[in-house]
Amino acid sequence: MSRRAEHDVRDLVERARAGEARAVARLISLVEDASPLLREVMAALAPHTGNAQVVGITGSPGVGKSTSTNALVTQLRRAGKRVGVLAVDPSSPFSGGALLGDRVRMQDHALDAGVYIRSMASRGHLGGLAWSTPQALRVLDAAGCDVILVETVGVGQSEVEIAGLADTTMVLLAPGMGDGIQAAKAGILEIGDLYVVNKADRDGADQVRRDLRSMLALATGRDGAWKPPIIKTVAQTGEGVDEVVDKLAEHHAWLASSGELERRRTRRARGEIEAIAVTALREKWGDVHGRSELDTLAAAVAAGDADPYGAADELLAAFTD
Amino acid sequence: MSRRAEHDVRDLVERARAGEARAVARLISLVEDASPLLREVMAALAPHTGNAQVVGITGSPGVGKSTSTNALVTQLRRAGKRVGVLAVDPSSPFSGGALLGDRVRMQDHALDAGVYIRSMASRGHLGGLAWSTPQALRVLDAAGCDVILVETVGVGQSEVEIAGLADTTMVLLAPGMGDGIQAAKAGILEIGDLYVVNKADRDGADQVRRDLRSMLALATGRDGAWKPPIIKTVAQTGEGVDEVVDKLAEHHAWLASSGELERRRTRRARGEIEAIAVTALREKWGDVHGRSELDTLAAAVAAGDADPYGAADELLAAFTD
């Protein structure tokens, strides 16, 4: 790296730490673009991370994820918290651009200096979500956010993957979104630290809460001590959102005191290191011996001339030679 | 491997190739269990693969994926095809078992020897869907299936990932499932080779088709020559399903003649080889120098004492030493 680039990175990191929104945005763009400068950026950020509570927000389309995120930001700001919002769109690798940009989302908070809002596409990244999201979180964390809300955009996203990246996972449900079996099929009943029944002014909200309560009672507790609360909200009006904020803080305190926070963050770091290492390997595999060894092997497997295990052996041997 | 195990694998593969359903089921169980025997199974199957058309079926919950799959099987059987159905559930890594087993799904075809139906959970696999699905497909392919329908179960699954594994991707929509932007958010508008508007007897079906048509017209063609058709069906009654079967055959012929089939299959094999190689590496990473090097590095990154890039470097260095 040139000394100029090195200076630029340090300057950018300093300005982001001082809370300058443009510097934060630029650093997340470096993550999104998989910039070669990231190596130095992450090294510079590392000592300044670990303060933010990362909250993953999941739920089926239509439950009101965006509205709830918006209402949560309002309530967290009232409580004096600095808030980051990361909207991740892992579902559309072929699109030329995010359908919902930063500007049309969350206009309520566009002028608030205590809120960073950022949409990020993970398409095009070799390592996908596992690679890019933790690095974007690290930027927002070092920039002084107290709480970072991670919301996935679109259908078909990996809810479970987001849960793996968060300290606290909040699962949203709403009446009229399908019966209990639908919810269970979604696999979201086992990942929640907090359950929110949104649109609680509609018919069926109490039934959703009852169904949820009996299903959670059947599930064996994941972490022993923490019993996931179920909260009713009307995100549109803000009703119940103060209770959500209280429960988020409660969960954060429990995480810290139980040692679970460290365990979850170590697990997250583990995934991140693996993703970076695998990405580095994949780049090499695409270009071994001056041609793509992997493409040659893949063509042989596709033609039935080789089996995938033998091909994987050859690939690993070519790399470690 | 013992000579006994070796003999068992050969016997199993022979019986699966002869069309014995129990042998097919047993081989897919080996895939699901990530059995050490798989290496030899895949080597034995490799020469007998490449005949089946793999059809991925995607769509939001509620559009009628299961009913459509069922109706397609009926129609394909009428056309004399041998059919495999692989229902993949990537969304619930924590559950103790699939909610919808083979027995409750597709009861219409339970006694038909020309149909293999199999649910498969990819949870617990280090390589996930990318690792297990191609191997299960190879089993069904070698067992003589002409068409294999791959359906994802539940919400939150990786629609795009399934599309990457299929020769032909069929996207299901239905009236009343949200507006055009919802569909576009789903990222499914760019992955379809075939679009099916199901529940076409309901209000709004023509509107869905019109919206779809204008959105597809805006999109630039991915493959040049193939123009994805839009077909209206009522899967419940079978209406329109014959046309779907015709279009699937047409797409298969186009894939073969255009060279796109080979390209897609090579891409699929590439992903599969990578997933196997990465899984092998991850297993090693978890146990380098008699302890978990990766866990130590992850704890350092979580504590802010190391950055993920440096940690990834150390991991790779420890492995290639």
Image (tube, coloured by chain):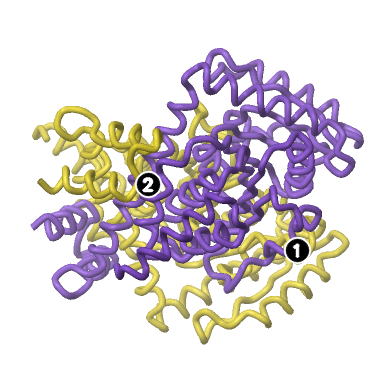
Chain colours: A yellow, B purple
User: Looking at the image, which residue sits at the far bottom?
Assistant: A225
Q: Is residue A299 left or right of residue A217?
A: left
Residue sitting at x 44%, y 27%? B262
Q: Is residue B200 visible?
A: yes
Q: Position of residue B242 (x, y in %)?
A: 80, 30
Q: State the residue at coordinates (68%, 62%).
A: B102
Q: Amino acid at mark 1?
A: Val
- Along the horizontal axis of the image, is B42 left or right of A42? right
Residue that numbered label 1 is attached to: B104
Is the same chain shared between marks 2 and 1?
no
What subunit carries mark 1? B
Element type where label 1 sits in the image:
loop
Name the quadrant containing residue B103: bottom right
Judged from the image, the secondary structure of the residue bearing numbered disc 2 is helix
Residue B286, given in percent of the width and then of the height, sits at 26, 67
Circle 1 residues within 10 Å: few <14, some 14–19, many ≥20: few
Of marks 2 and 1, the one in the foreground: 1
Disc 2: which residue: A132
Is the residue B7 above or below the residue B273 in the image? below
